Image: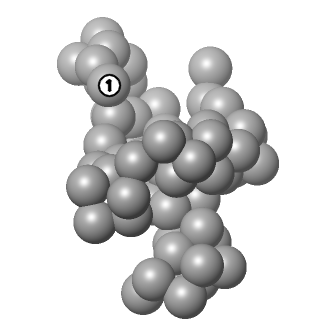
Amino acid sequence: VIEPESLIRDRIEKALTIFEPGKLYIDPDCGLKTRTVEEAQAKLRTMVAAARAVRSAHHLA
């Protein structure tokens, strides 16, 4: 299952209510090893897009 970018963005936004941006690192939890290469790449692309969107919205980039 590849989570929608909007869900990942929401999770990052929630984390930003707890952690300072400089202390928040966005990375995959685990489980990519059990996925196909295509699935892992798709998950990572979605995660990167969500992180970039949040950085842009908060002028962090």
Q: Which of the image's four quarters has the C terminus?
A: bottom left
Spot occupied by residue 8 in the image (x, y as percentages of width and height): 62, 42
Tag count: 1
Q: What element carries label 1?
A: loop
* Left or right of 18, for residue 9: right
Q: In this rendered view, identify the residue nearer to me: 32 or 7.
A: 7
Amino acid type, mark 1:
Asp
Q: Position of residue 40 (x, y in %)?
A: 38, 35
Which corner quadrant of the image does residue 50 belong to? Answer: bottom right
The answer to whether residue 61 is visible is yes
Q: Name the residue under label 1.
A: 29
- The colour style of the image is one colour
Where is residue 6 shown, x and y percent of the image?
76, 48
Q: Nearer the viewer, residue 35 or 55?
A: 55
Q: Position of residue 14 (x, y in %)?
A: 62, 42
Q: Which of 18 and 33 is in front in this view?
A: 18
Rate crowding at label 1 as few (under 14), some (14 to 19) or many (20 or more) other CA atoms within 10 Å. few
**Quadrant (top left/top right/bottom left/bottom right) for the N terminus:** top right
- Compared with 15, 59 (above or below) is below
Vertically, is 38 above or below 46?
A: above
Write the residue at 52% across / 75% down.
55
The quarter of the displayed image where residue 36 is located: top left
Q: Residue at x 32, y 52 (%)?
A: 24
Q: Evaluate whether residue 8 shows in this view.
A: no
Q: Which residue is drawn at 70% across and 44% down?
A: 10
Q: Is 43 left or right of 54, judged from the image as shown?
A: left
